[in-house]
Image (cartoon, rainbow, N blue to C red):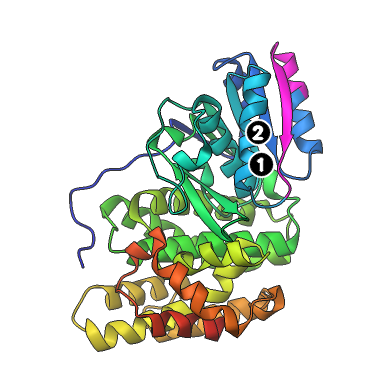
Amino acid sequence: MSLSTPDFDFATAGRILFGAGVAARISAEAATMGRRALLVCGRRTVPALALGRRLEAEGMKWHIFSVAGEPEVEQVSQGARMARDQRCDLVIGYGGGSALDAAKAIAALATNTRPVETYLEIIGRGRPLDRAPLPCIAVPTTAGTGSEVTRNAVLKSRDHQVKVSLRSPGMLPAVAVVDPALTVDAPAHITAATGCDALTQLLEAFVSTKANALTDALCREALGRAARALPRVVARGDDLAARTEMSLAALFSGLALANGGLGAVHGIAGPLGGMIEAPHGALCARLLPAAVAVNLEALARRQPDGPALARFDEAAQRMLGRTDAGGVDLVAWLEQLSSQLQIPSLRHWGFTSEAVPALVAKAKAASSMKGNPIPLSEEELAKIVSQAM
């Protein structure tokens, strides 16, 4: 396992605007990219409609496309057809990670008109895009996925009961607009789930086999911020300072995962989300303590002299704020956090023990699993799932 090697390739959004109030610049940025925008949002359309009026003030035409819940393959295909029919020349994603993923996928499929399966991983042919996507502006209203700076869109296939990625370097947004003030209205349960997703992404990227010097710097800076701020924003949603910390942590998590990979938590959570209806961040939060514990056990048995155990210890020290903390302390802290944030068990979402073998089989094939610090057996993967139930 090689970590923090000097050679790396780092890619991100064309520009990143960060800070309370930067959302006021979206319409002016959009006006430099085109005259007709498709505005992709979640089920809450009112904030997006306000943005639409600001686009009109810039002399732009716009159409709205709402995605209720996590984006599905057929939904984004419909959105792409709408973008073509309305002759849109840019796409703006405004909302949580689902809206941003939908926007990136729609921008890609609007110009790439072969059947969507042509480009999808796992269930499709995984071919590169034929043409450059429409330019995309990504505006997160939650602090979680970091989708504003990643090059893929996670889509649910109901037919296959799995989540898959549409992926291309060209899918990186032209501009990411990260305004912590937009996250203040997020309910506590959404704040908890999305925040746990960001925390998981930071931790997995830090111990990933694909980590490099730049992703290390991002994770080291953000792990402690996320661990301190997450309980605060769940308890007090109007705490703008804590919201800013979480928005920065989520942004850094997206930068880190896009360039350093993930691990077993996302390797399991991705296919699990295709089998049950549950928020992705809540699944990550529930799986994380068990995944860390199982990884620690596997590393102690098979790679006791490798660098990954020390990585977990360092992560524990940064997150817990204690120089004597180690991996075992981290597991206990994560379990306590899950309880404090009232993260439901997998059974709460309808997952049963009978489905564990099918989930493990799908998880083994997940691209995220490639970054896990040590290859895990089917028995070890099943243990993670069982402990999360």
Q: Residues within 10 Å of mark 2 (few under 14, many from 20)?
A: many
- For residue 79, the mark is 2
- For residue 298, the mark is none
Answer yes or no: is residue 283 visible: yes
Q: Secondary structure at mark 2?
A: helix
Q: Residues within 10 Å of mark 1 (few under 14, many from 20)?
A: many
The quadrant in which residue 38 appears is top right
Residue at the (70%, 39%) spot, across then down:
41
Q: Quadrant of the C terminus?
A: bottom right
Instruction: Give the residue pinned by disc 1.
Output: 75
Residue nearer the viewer, 347 or 77? 77
Q: Residue furthest right?
A: 46
**Disc 2 residue type?**
Gly
Q: With 172 as the anchor, is 103 left or right in this view?
A: right
- The residues colored magenta run 53-68
Residue at the (73%, 58%) spot, across then down:
237
Residue nearer the viewer, 170 or 256? 170
The answer to whether the residues at label 1 and label 2 have Cβ atoms under 8 Å apart is yes
- Does residue 318 sit above or below 293 in this rendering? above
Residue at the (19%, 56%) spot, across then down:
5
- Does residue 45 sit above or below 214 in this rendering? above
- Does residue 104 sit above or below 298 in this rendering? above
Q: Secondary structure at mark 1?
A: helix
Q: Position of residue 252 (x, y in %)?
A: 45, 51
Q: Position of residue 208 (x, y in %)?
A: 33, 64
Estimate the spatial distance between the alpha carbons at disc 1 and disc 2, rounded to whole Å.
6 Å
Q: Position of residue 114 (x, y in %)?
A: 49, 31
Q: Quadrant of the N terminus?
A: bottom left
Q: Residue furthest top?
A: 59
Residue at the (42%, 25%) spot, across then down:
131
Q: Position of residue 197 (x, y in %)?
A: 55, 61
